[in-house]
Every structure is written in structure tokens, then in C-alpha cells.
Amino acid sequence: MQDSPAFRRLSELIDLTPQGRNYLLALLASPVELAARRKLLDEHRPCDSIFLVLSGWVQLFRQLKDGGRQVLNFRLPGEVFGIESLLYRRSLYSCQALTNASIAQISHNMFEATQQEFPRLASAFLLTAVKDGAIHYEWAVNLGRRPAFQRIAHLFLELERRARMSLASPDDDVHLPLTQQHIADCTGLTVPYVNRILQQMRALQFLEYGPQGLTILDGKRLAVAAGFEPDYLEVSWQTNWQRHVPENAPEEAG
């Protein structure tokens, strides 16, 4: 478990002590198991927990009155959602499993105890919201200014990079479990238009569809075509200065 995506992703944000890692292990001990397409949250309904994806993919979305859906983002293994529940009593979005998923649920009481006993670990959870903010900026640019081909390519490249960050080996294959409808709901395009773009990408040998989902074949060429710069996803330098800061007394005592 201590080599899981949850530990790898949180360790990018905070230099966790061994005691903090053991405490995190306890927080993740009883996950919720979700089958694909099962909902975890409904927008406007009460929410009093923070969630951490242990395996699988989930989608965060808003359901529109006309039946349409806007996907706000996905959460991949090792990623956190629900931080805003510390400020808002009701959920700001719905959450549904895209694939079979295992999700740790951390109540506000558990998070409060974490802040008191292991403030560095609690900071790691809070810093995920900062990183998510940077991702939201890119999604806003994607929806507002990029043409359709670049918009879809940027989405694929970001998700492929985030999925790869969760893997034990960066050389493992990455498959994006996205349908054309998912892509349309992310990018604000119609399904027929998405289909046309995907045909272009296949013709250029940028990607292929298989039983497990979409696979990027030539990320370098696709990144050039999309103008993709991954700097906003790479935050591991954050832990460097922490190694020069004395260990927090409560963590050391824990």
C-alpha cells in the first residue's frame, strides 16, 4: 500500500515522515468500492467528506436542466476531490465512477484529527486544491480559446500524463477509458464533431482505440500539434525546501 498511487501523489506535494505515511495508511484502510457508472455524490446534496481515489477513474460533472452534462474533470488514482466540502455544506458537483473504482472516504472529523496530529499530511490534502486550480485554468483556456483539434489533443495529453504519474513504472502502457460522449462532455463539442477529430488523429497515427480505451501512439508529435506544455502538472520540486525545515513536533511525536 505504501507504494500506491495515493502515497506517490501526496508525496509529490509534501515530504511525508514515516509516521505520517503510517497515519495515511490508516486513513485509507476502509475504501468504498464503486462499480462503473455508479454515483458517489449528487450536486446540491450534503457532503461532509474528502475523497481519495485508490484505483479506477471517476468523473466530476454538472447535470444541466436540458439533459446535457458538462464534465468538470476526472479524478485518477492518487488524486483527491471533495476538499471544497470544508467550506460548502452541499456538493458543488456530481461524481460518478467511470470505471470500477476504489475510493477512500475521509470524514471532516478524521481530517480535523489529521490537522492536529499530522499537520504536514493535512497540508498535502489542502495543496491538492492548489494543483487542481492550475488544472482548472488550463481547462478554462481549453474551452474558451483552443480550436477543436487542439482542445481534444490537450485533454488527452493531460490525462495521459496524470495517469502515468500514478503508475509504479512510467513505462507501463496507459489507456484512457473515454468514450466519444465523455470527450464531447469535456470539451463542449458535439459527438459527431468529436468523431471527425478522432478520425483525423487516427489518420495521423497519433492514437488508436482498443478494447481498454484510447492509447496515445506519438505523444511528442501530438504535443507539438496541441501546443501542450505540461509544467502546470509537475510540482515535485515543492518537497525540496521542506527537507530543510525541521520535522513538525506533533508528527514526530506521532
Image (cartoon, rainbow, N blue to C red):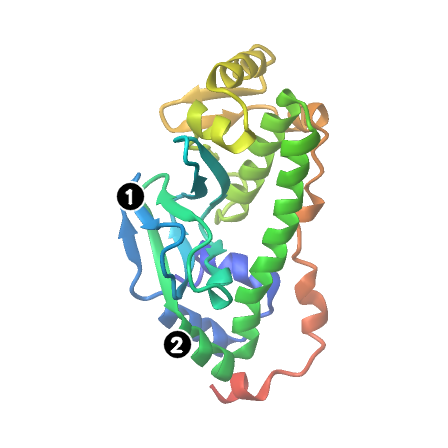
Q: Is residue 250 above or below residue 62?
A: below
- Measuring from the top left, give residue 175's x and y in whole percent: 45, 32
Where residue 111 sits: x, y (%)? 44, 73
Q: Is residue 227 left or right of residue 154?
A: right
Q: In which quadrant of the rendered image does the N terminus lie?
A: bottom left
- Depth order, front residue of 2/9: 9
Q: Nearer the viewer, residue 52 or 190?
A: 190
Label 2 CA crowd tier, 10 Å (few <14, some 14–19, many 20+): few
Give the numbered dot on residue 90: none
Q: Judge by depth and name the residue closer to the eye, 89 or 168.
A: 89
Looking at the image, tell me whether mark 1 or mark 2 is earlier in sequence order.
1
On screen, residue 235 above or below 116: above
Residue picked out by circle 2? 109
Residue at 52% x, 72% y: name it: 122
The amino acid sitting under disc 2 is: Asn
Name the residue rendered at 39%, 76% in the picture. 109
Label 2: which secondary element: helix
- Measured from the top left, where is residue 136 in percent x and y? 61, 46
Q: Secondary structure at mark 1?
A: loop
The image shows residue 168, relative to residue 189, as above or below, that is: below
Numbered mark located on residue 38 in the image = 1
**Residue 23: where, in percent of width, then height?**
42, 75
Disc 1 crowd, CA 10 A, few/some/many (<14, 14-19, 20+): some
Amino acid type at circle 1 is: Arg
Quadrant in the picture for residue 202: top right
Marks 1/2: CA–CA distance? 26 Å
Q: Which residue is the extreme one toward the front?
A: 65
